[in-house]
Image (cartoon, helix red, strand yellow):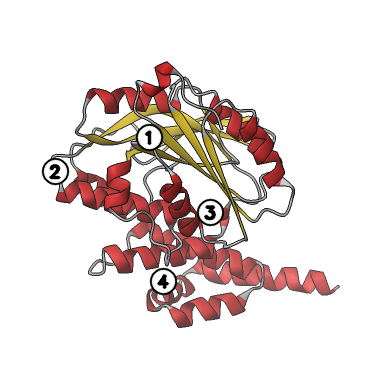
Amino acid sequence: MTSPSGEASACPRCSVICLTYNHAAYSAAAIASVAEQTYPNIEIIVVDDGSTDGNADIVEAALKSCGRPYKFLRQENTGNIAMNMNRGIAAATGDYMSMFSLDDLLLPDCIATKMELLIADPKLVFVANTCNMEVDGAGRVTDPLYKSGLYELEIATAEALLELEFEHIGLLYMQGVVISAHVVRAIKGYDEDLKGDDLIIRTKIFRHMQAHPELGFCLLHRPGVQYRKHSENIHRNSWRQVKLALEWRDRFFPDRSMPHLWRVWVVRALKTSIAEGDMDTVTTMTSEHSEISEVYNGYRGSWKFWRNMAKNKIRQLFARA
C-alpha cells in the first residue's frame, strides 16, 4: 500500500469503490484505468465477491503495482451488489466516492473533471456524466457516445431529476459518478434488500438533495467511462429489470402507477419468454404481480401476441421433425 504524495495530500481524497466477480479477463485493465487517473489523490477499494476464475489473484497483483493507496477485500460469494458496495463504502476514507465495476474502464480525466467542480463549489455533492462510450468484450468501441436520458438537458432541481428518474426508470450509469461521502453516509448507502442497486442509490441521493435544497449537482455532457457490454452483464435479464422496477416503485413511489417504459419492458420480456416457449415463467410472473397480469392481458388482445404464438408453434413443430 503506497502513501499519497505531497501533491495528492493537498487535495481531497476520492475513494473509487470497485466491485468485481469473475472479471479475470478485464480487471487488470480496469484497475490500471483507475490508477492512471489524472487526479492525484485517489484511493482504490476493491471488493471481490468470491470469484472462481482466478480474478482475485489478478486483482491483487494489479493493486500491488498500481502506485495508489488501496484496500482489497476478498469474501465468499454473496451475489448481493448492494451489500458489497456498502462494505466498500465502510472501508473508504475519502471525502468523495466513486462507484466502479472492474469490467469497465475509466477515461483518464473522469475523476479530475468532477473533483475540480466539487472543490470549487462546496455545495456541489453529485457530479455525473450524461453519456458514455460503449465497448465490446474485446475492448472495441461500439458506440462512442451512448446518451442517457439526461444528455444535453439543463436540469435545475432535484425534483426534476426525480421525475425524470421515475419516467426513465434509470437516468444514467453510476460508474464514474463522484459523490460527497457525507451524502452517501447520510442516506445509509445502498438498500441491501433490493436488487436495483444503481437505481436505488440515485433515487436516495436525489431525494436527499430534494430535502436539502442548498445542495447542488452538476451534469457533464461528455463521456467519463467506457462501459463494456458482454454476455455476463446483469442488466440484460428482462424479467429481472421488470421485477426490480416494481420493487423500486413500491418503496419510493408507492402511490404512482408504473410508467409507460416499464410496460414496454414487460411486453419485451413476454415476447422473449413466448419465443423461447417458456410459458411457465409467463404464468409465474402474471400470477405474482397484478400489474404484469394487466399488461399481459392487454398484450394477449393484440395481433402481435397471436403472431408470436403462431411463430412459436411453428418453431416447435420444426424442432420435433
Identify the element where label 3 is drawn: helix
Q: Say which label, 2 or 4, has the lower sequence index.
A: 2
Q: At label 3, which amino acid type do we have? A: His
Is residue 268 positioned above or below 226 on the image?
A: below
Q: Quadrant of residue 49?
A: bottom right
Find disc 4 in the rendering and name its residue. 295
Find disc 2 in the rendering and name its residue. 213
Is residue 128 positioned above or below 288 on the image?
A: above
Q: At label 2, which amino acid type do we have? A: Pro
Disc 2 + disc 3, Cβ < 8 Å: no
The outermost residue toward the bottom is 287
- Alpha carbons under labels 2 and 4: distance apart: 38 Å
Q: Say which label, 4 or 1, has the lower sequence index.
A: 1
Q: Residue shown at 38%/61% (left/top)?
A: 191
Identify the element where label 2 is drawn: loop
- Alpha carbons under labels 1 and 2: distance apart: 22 Å
Find disc 3 in the rendering and name its residue. 235
- Alpha carbons under labels 3 and 1: distance apart: 18 Å
Q: Which is closer to the viewer, label 2 or label 4?
A: 2
Q: Residue shown at 21%/30% (left/top)?
A: 122
Find disc 1 in the rendering and name its residue. 130
